[in-house]
């Protein structure tokens, strides 16, 4: 779940300013499969909620986020 990953990201890097070196490190931190974390990071990056560093790391550019969502059954 991308939302869970985003929440856990702040637990691992509290101020968001320290990039994780790679997605394996992030997967270990959230105790999830690397492939799924890679997919979630891709989605969150496209939404602008995470950013990839030139060295391949991942950083959250926000200190705090408030996200409202409305979900409807298909």
Image (cartoon, grey):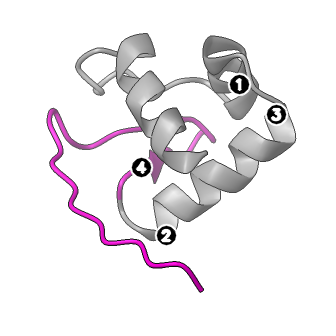
What distance separates the C-alpha of mark 2 from that of mark 1?
19 Å
The circle on residue 46 is 2
In the image, 74 versus 18, the foreground residue is: 74
The circle on residue 27 is 1
Q: Are marks 2 and 1 in contact (CB under 8 Å)?
A: no
In the image, 65 versus 24, the foreground residue is: 65
Q: Which residue is mark 4?
A: 50
Residue shown at 53%/24% (left/top)? 20
Q: Quadrant of the C terminus?
A: bottom right
Question: Is 26 displayed left or right of 68 in the figure?
Answer: right
- Boundaries of the magenta span: 49-74
Mark found first going from the N terminus, 4 or 1: 1
Tell me the element at label 4: loop
What distance separates the C-alpha of mark 3 from that of mark 1?
5 Å
What distance separates the C-alpha of mark 3 from that of mark 2?
18 Å
The circle on residue 34 is 3
* Residue 71: % across, % down: 41, 72
For label 4, the crowd category at 10 Å Cα-Cα, with few meaning under 14, some 14 to 19 and many 20 or more, is many
For label 2, the crowd category at 10 Å Cα-Cα, with few meaning under 14, some 14 to 19 and many 20 or more, is few
Question: Is 21 displayed left or right of 17 in the figure?
Answer: right
What distance separates the C-alpha of mark 4 from that of mark 3?
16 Å
Residue shown at 49%/69% (left/top)? 46
Number of numbered callouts drawn: 4
Mark found first going from the N terminus, 3 or 2: 3
* Residue 38: % across, % down: 73, 46
């Amino acid at each position: 779940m991308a939302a869970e990953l985003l929440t856990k990201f702040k637990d691992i890097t509290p101020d968001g300013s320290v990039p994780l070196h790679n997605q394996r490190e992030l997967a270990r931190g959230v105790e999830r499969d690397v492939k799924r974390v890679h997919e979630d990071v891709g989605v969150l990056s496209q939404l602008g909620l995470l950013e990839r560093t030139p060295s391949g790391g991942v950083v959250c550019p926000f200190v705090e986020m408030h996200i409202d969502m409305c979900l409807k059954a298909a």
